Amino acid sequence: MGQGRLVLASNAIGKPVRAVGGFYGMALDTFVQMFKPPFAWREFIVQAWFVARVSIVPTLMLTVPYTVLLTFTFNILLTEFGAADFSGTGAALGTVRQIGPIVTVLVVAGAGATAMCADLGARTIREELDALRVMGINPIQALVVPRVLAATVVSLALSATVILVGLAGAYVFCVYIQHVSPGAFAGGLTLIIGGLDVTIALVKAALFGLSAGLIACYKGISVGGGPAGVGNAVNETVVFTFMALFAINVVATAVAVKVTL
Amino acid sequence: MVDDWIDGWNRVGHQTQFYGTALRNIGYVFAHYRIELLRIIAQMGLGAGALVMIGGTVAIVAFLTVTTGALVAVQGYTDFSEIGVEALTGFASAFFNVRLIAPATTAIALAATIGAGATAQLGAMRINDEIDALEVMGIRSVAFLASTRVIAGLVVVIPLYCVGVLASFWAARLGTTVFYGQSTGVYDHYFRTFLNPTDLIWSFVQSIAMAVAIMLIHTYYGFTASGGPAGVGEAVGRAVRSSLIISAFVVMMISLAVYGQSGNFNLAG
C-alpha cells in the first residue's frame, strides 16, 4: 500500500520533469540535425507553404480589429491632450512594438502550431514515425527540422505582414473615420519608431516561430492514446506556446528597451 | 468552385442553427442536467489532463495577465520617461489594462484553455460515436454537451476575469515601483485617479460576451469533428483560430459602441 502510493507520487512528480527533459533533448537534437546534410528541402517548402496558408487569413482578420482598437483607445487620449495630429506616432508605436509581435504570437501559436501538432500527432498515432525509424531515416531530421525552420521563416514574414496591414488599417481608421490629416499621420509615423525597432520586432517574431515550432513538434511526436490524445496534445500545445511566447515577449521587450536607450 | 461556395454557405447556416439550439436549450439544462452542469463547472475551473499539473486554468490566466501587465510597466515606463512624464505609468496601467489588455488577454486564455479543451473532449466523443450513443439513450446531446459548457464558461469567466485584472494591475505596479524604482505614492495616486469603475464594469461585460462566443464556437467545432484522430486535432486548431478572430471582433465592437465618440475619458479628472 505504502509502496504503491510512493510509485504514484513519483509518477506525479516524474511526468512533468520527464516532459521538460524530453523537450530539451528534442530541441538539442533539432539544432544538431539542422546543420547535418542532407537537408529536407522539399519538406521545408511544403511545410512553409502549409503554415503560411493556414496563417494568412487569421493574421489579416486579427490585425485589423486589434489595430482599430489600439488606435481608437490611443486617439481618445491624444484628443484629450489636443494632440490628435500625433495619432500616426501612436499607431506606429503600438503596431511595431506591441500589436506586431502579439498578433504574430497569436497566429503562430493558434493557427500554425496547432495545425502542425495535429498533423504530426496523427502520424505518430498511425506509427509512421516508427516506420521511418525502421527504414533508417531519422524523423527529427526528416520531419522536425524542416517544420521548425518553416515556422521560423513564416512567422518572420507574418510579422512584417502584420505591421504593414496594421499601419494601413490605422491609416484608414484615423484619416477617414477620426478625421486626422493624412500628412500629419504619415509625418508622425517615424517620430519615435525607427529601423532599430522594426529589426527588434522581426527578431522577436523569429524567436516566437522557433519556440512555437519546437513545442508543437515535441507535443506532436510524443502523442499517445487515440483521438482524445491528439486533441489533448493540440490543446496543450496552444496553452504552452501562449505561455512561452508571452514570457519571451516580456523578456525580449525589456532587452530591446535596454538596447535602444 | 460553385460547390465550394454552396458548401461554405450551408456551413454558416448549420453553425447558426447549432448556436440557436445551444442557447435555446439553456433553460432545459437548468431543469434536467443540473448535476452534469456542476461537474463541468468544476472540471473547467481546474482544467483537464496535463494542464492540472501547472495549476489549471486559473494559473494559466494569471500567468498570461502577469506577463502583459509587466509589459505595461516595461513599455509604458520607458516611453513616458522619454518625454519626462514617467509618473503617468500608473495612469497607463489603469487606462490600457482595463480597456484593452485585460479583456483581450482573458479571451486568449479562455480560448486556449477551456475552449480548446472542450473541442478536444467533444471531438473525441464524436469520433468514438459516444454522441450518437447519447442520442440513442434519449438524451438531448446539444443541451447535455454544448449548452452545459456555455453556461459553465459563463460561470467560470467571472472569477477568471477578476484574477486576470488583479494580476495585470499587480504586475504593472510591481514592475514600475520595484524594478524601475518609482515611489509607490506617485504610482498609486495616478492609478487611483484614473481608474474608472464604469470602465471596469464594461470590460467585465466584454469578457462575459466573449466567453459565450468562445464556448459556442469551440463546442460547435468539437461537435462536428470528423476524420479520426487527425480530425480531432484539426478541429481544435480551427476552433482556436476562429474563436480568436471572433473574440477580437467582439472586443472591438463593444469598445466602439461603449466609448464611441465621447471616449468617456476626462484628463482633468
Image: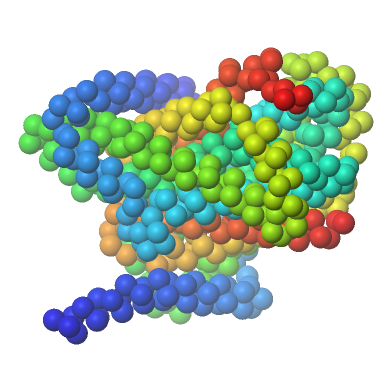
The picture places residue B80, in percent across and down from the top left corner, at 81, 43
Residue at 69% x, 15% y is B262
Asked whether A87 or A115 is in front, the reply is A87
Asked whether B1 or B15 is in front, the reply is B15
Asked whether A70 or B118 is in front, the reply is A70
Furthest residue toward front: B185
Q: Is residue B23 left or right of residue B100?
A: left
The picture quadrant where one finds residue A15 is: bottom left
Residue at 89% x, 32% y is A188
Q: Is residue A256 above or below residue B195?
A: below
Q: Is residue A70 left or right of residue A243?
A: right
Taking the image as drawn, is residue A245 in sight?
Answer: yes
Q: Is residue A4 above or below residue A132?
A: below
Colour option used: rainbow
The picture places residue B143, in percent across and down from the top left corner, at 22, 30
Furthest residue toward left: B137
Residue at 25% x, 34% y is B148
Q: Is residue B267 left or right of residue B11?
A: right
The picture places residue A155, in percent across and down from the top left corner, at 65, 51
Taking the image as drawn, is residue A99 in sight?
Answer: no
Tell me the quarter of the image containing the C terminus of chain B: top right
Furthest residue toward bottom: A3
Asked whether B244 or B195 is in front, the reply is B195
The picture places residue B168, in percent across and down from the top left corner, at 58, 46
Q: How many marks?
A: 0
Q: Is residue A134 above or below residue B213?
A: below
The picture quadrant where one finds residue B155 is: top left
Residue at 34% x, 52% y is B47
